[in-house]
Image: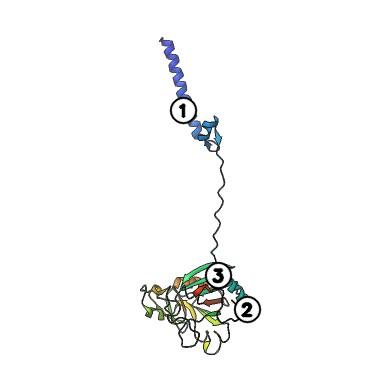
């Protein structure tokens, strides 16, 4: 090969390398306007853009409410109308759980402890009453979690949490917040020796965290301190409370209310 031929080959090779390098720089600086599919291009002999499908926002899942509970709520609204009945507290004794309902859906739920002696409506029965109630007093706003209340007043002491699952003694303390209930069904949970208000039946905080989810109280509905604070903030005076046995799935049946359920 002559010198001239060698020079021409060298010049061509250099131009090819320079062209490839320039193309790489241009591609890095100016990216393609959309992604491309190379797998289908081999079949068609051309490059085809990939379709991009916008991702829809994930809808917020509604918490399901038992249909029977919604039926009971509608009955309460009809029989005991109140401006505060847009929310409902429902306590299921069988499952030891409290549900907060708002606008026909479940807003929140927490484990609770109802009476260690089961269901009881009469004074000195130390049982948890059933039926329909209202919150008539809210006590303890601003108190720290675990603050002990005696005669509805803080005593300046904090009850330390107890995690043991068999320490009933820790359930004697009333702590943090009180939601005082009054019955709405005369002869069942209102008046005479079945009067819920006079029995001092509350939803209140407890130090006995290890017993939550199991019956442990002397009639009240006990909650963890942080849970009762959250409930206290969400509900107002007059909010209806439904307490049901919960056994057998009879959620729509309202104890003490004849002709319903």
Q: Write the residue at 38% across / 79% down.
A: 168
* First-in-chain label (1 vs 3): 1
Contact between labelled residues 2 and 1, with CB atoms less than 8 Å apart = no
- Measure how far apart labels 2 and 3 are at the Cα level: 18 Å
- Classify 38 as above or below 95: above
Please state the horizontal and vertical placement of residue 174, each as a whole percent of the image: 44, 80
Which residue position holds label 2?
Answer: 79
- Quadrant assignment, res 76: bottom right
Query: Residue lying farthest front?
Result: 248
Mark 2, secondary structure of its residue:
helix
Give the numbered dot on residue 104.
Answer: none
* First-in-chain label (2 vs 3): 2
Q: Write the residue at 48% across / 31% down.
A: 25
- Measure how far apart labels 1 and 3 are at the Cα level: 67 Å
Q: Write the residue at 49% across / 29% down.
A: 23
Of circles 2 and 3, the one toward us is 2
Assign the C terminus to one quadrant of the image.
bottom right
Which residue position holds label 3?
Answer: 101
Residue 108 or residue 18, whichever sits in front: 108
* First-in-chain label (1 vs 2): 1
Mark 1, secondary structure of its residue:
helix
Which residue position holds label 1?
Answer: 21
Of circles 1 and 3, the one toward us is 3
- Classify 120 as above or below 235: below
Please state the horizontal and vertical placement of residue 167, each as a whole percent of the image: 36, 77
Mark 2 surroundings within 10 Å by alpha-carbon count, few (fewer than 14), some (14 through 19), many (20 or more): few
How many marks are shown on the rendered structure? 3
């Amino acid at each position: 090969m002559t010198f001239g031929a060698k020079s021409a080959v060298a010049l061509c090779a250099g131009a090819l390398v320079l062209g490839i390098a320039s193309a790489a720089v241009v591609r890095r600086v100016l990216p393609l306007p959309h992604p491309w599919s190379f797998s289908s291009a081999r079949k068609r002999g051309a490059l085809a853009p990939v379709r991009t499908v916008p991702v829809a926002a994930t809808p917020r899942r509604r918490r399901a409410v038992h249909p029977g509970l919604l039926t009971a709520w509608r009955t309460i609204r009809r029989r005991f109308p109140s401006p505060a009945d847009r929310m409902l507290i429902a306590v299921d004794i069988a499952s030891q759980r409290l549900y907060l309902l708002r606008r026909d859906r479940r807003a929140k739920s927490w484990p609770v402890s109802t009476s260690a002696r089961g269901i009881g409506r009469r004074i000195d029965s130390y049982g948890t009453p059933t039926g329909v109630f209202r919150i008539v007093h809210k006590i303890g706003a601003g108190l720290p979690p675990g603050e002990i209340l005696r005669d509805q007043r803080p005593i300046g002491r904090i009850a330390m949490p107890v995690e043991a699952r068999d320490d009933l003694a820790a359930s004697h303390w009333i702590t943090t917040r009180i939601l005082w209930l009054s019955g709405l069904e005369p002869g069942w949970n209102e008046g005479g020796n079945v009067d819920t208000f006079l029995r001092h039946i509350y939803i209140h905080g407890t130090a006995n965290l290890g017993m939550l989810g199991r019956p442990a109280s002397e009639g009240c509905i006990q909650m963890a301190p942080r849970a009762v604070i959250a409930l206290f903030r969400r509900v107002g005076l007059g909010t209806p409370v439904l307490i049901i046995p919960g056994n057998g799935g009879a959620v729509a049946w309202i104890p003490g209310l004849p002709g319903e359920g």
